[in-house]
Image (cartoon, grey):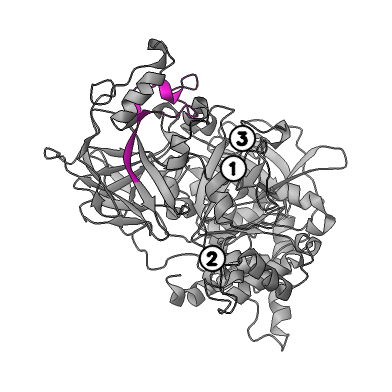
Amino acid sequence: MAFKSLKTKFTALLCVAIAGFTSCTEYIEESSRYTYSGHTVASFLESHPEIYSSFIEILDRGEYLSLMKAYGQYTCLAPTNEAITRYLREQDSIYRTSLANDSLKDPIWTGVTSPELSELSDSMCRVISRTHLIPEVFTTLDLEGDIIPTKNMNDRVLGLSHTTDKNSLSVIIINGNGKIISRDEEVENGVVHTLSEVLNPSPNTLPSQISKYKYFHIMSEALKATGYDEMMQDYIDLSYTDGDLMTVGSNGSGQTHYPANRYFGFSAFLEPDQLFYDKGIYNLDDLIIECAKWYPNADATAPLTSKKNPLNQFVAYHIMDRNLPYTRLICYNLTTDRWNSENDYFDTSDRNEFYETFANRIVKVTMPRSKVSNPGKRNTIYLNWYDEANSPVEDYINTVVYSPNTFRGLDEMYADFDPNALNGTIHPINKILLYDEDAMAGRVLNMIVRIDFAGLLSELTNNDIRWNGLTQRYGSGELYIPNNFCKNLKVYSEESRIFYYAPVSAWGSYQGDEVVGFSSYDFAYKLPPMPAGTYEIRFGYSVGPLRGIVQYYFDNVATGIPVDLRISSESPNIGFIADAKTDDNGIQNDKEMKNRGYLKGPAAMCGNTREQVARDHPHIIRIVVTTKYLSEGEHWLRFKNVFEFDDGTAQFMHDYIEIVPLSYVRDESIPIEEKRK
């Protein structure tokens, strides 16, 4: 990975936030909760100095107390005085014990060198303040799943777990140790939850987080042996200095932000050791032997760090270059201020995402909500899902990804599991994950592979841009994407202006969001690595008078004549006729449109309203860009503005791409309802 020389420098900065804490049993009276009219977060805390005086001092010295007095919308996770006292003593003890340990080359730096609050540095006060403040309001009713959906002001994801107390009342625990002991104190600029402990998110990078759990020992050793542990050490690009910049808005007026940071992120799908034991694999040497059987075309004599080696290929298929917590693996039950993902899909529509792994192979992530024979599986996330009604299904197909809470409940040894590392997420799985070309090409990916354009760019995920409302952090629903920000976005013209539009339910866009190009744009996206074969490449967009004219290129070769995206779908060039206005439910009209190179919108997604099928909406259109044989290696889809009369405001709205095996397109045994999805 890039920027390795910065790793050591930044690791020192990260060690300001380290270690865990003991549990706490004190509780605060909650019976008189109500909205504190006239109170801000700050004044509410100040009205209870017997509980929060230490946290108030930290906020004040960290220069965040005044912010908590100002207008805004915040969630304040306020640790008690006792929690802060305990935190300072424990962190100081860790530091001083390490000083006395002659076997340690360097002392363990925790950022705390005294048990006294007065000795805590102002910089550490800022870290603690930002860790406990979230720039959006979340009541406990909103705290579902395994993470708080918005990062804290320290740009960190906070994990969630749920349990019950001795009275069978629900208990919410944040980051494994911070129990909410008083909740939902609503004030004018947000809400306050009181915590039993000071939060201290893990400073571990993903490989370090994996290595701390003895039940992932074999995969941890495999990561080290293949060198992938080193490839997952990056956290932030310190050379990115545009975070404070702004540019003219996409409409030619106002100001739009650049991304605040450029973070790196990773996700690892991991088999617990017990899963290997059940297959007779007890150590790394055993795994190396089995990998040679699983990947017979690989070179077992190649170094373990070579991509030709079978162990390397096995491990690489488990890793992605994006930090995806469990609830963000799939577009399901996600909300922002103007978007609810469930307004974009029908409840019985499968949710699919397709990600490139370090093996340069695609992995399909699915929440099946249509054809599953067991309704209990409809909220389960699978890798390489294949309709269970079709058999046979190999051991490595339909692999379950455990939610953190489910995994903790499998065995008491997993009770300490925390999936969230500094730069990534651990995802335990229930089967040994393998890549088989025949199974992927013939079944798993024998479908319409539909990918949101924002999903092709890992940076939009790692920097909390995709599926985010943006308004809380950036003040508007759009963000400028610098030309050098995304590695899978190749920009040919420096005049290209590319914007991400945050999701809006009423737009009728796939997954609610849009990527839009302006000015003399000329750029290309790297496509995901599909199995070798012939595919129909489709482009999804929304027709409108504000669009422009684009020339498509595949691997830098023009694909036909330029396309005018302004043309009404009901014009003779496209020929859209609503199904209800035909005698055969649109079958003949589908053929006529396809002959012209167009398709109606997908029947699996909604139009502008929850009640409308995108297929029935004349503004939602797909165009067949080209039909190509995709060999192994990189392939790029390029877009160039050729609108002669563009004054810089014509929009190149690109919503999603579809990569469809030609064998699927031509297979007449597949029901028409399936192909219309």
Front position in the image: 622 or 504: 622
According to the image, label 3 marks what residue? 186
> Which circle marks residue 366 in the picture?
1
Q: Residue 642 at x, y = what percent?
A: 17, 43
Alpha-carbon distance for marks 2 and 1?
46 Å
In the rendered view, tell whether residue 640 sits above or below residue 575.
below
Q: Residue 649 at x, y = what percent?
A: 20, 38
According to the image, label 2 marks what residue? 122
Q: Residue 664 at x, y = what percent?
A: 47, 38
Residue 619 appears in the figure: no
Give the amino acid type for the residue marked by disc 1 in the picture: Thr
Q: Residue 54 at x, y = what percent?
A: 65, 56
Q: Which residues are magenta?
A: 599-627
Residue 432 lies in quadrant: bottom right
Alpha-carbon distance for marks 1 and 3?
37 Å
Is 535 placed left or right of 119 in the picture? left
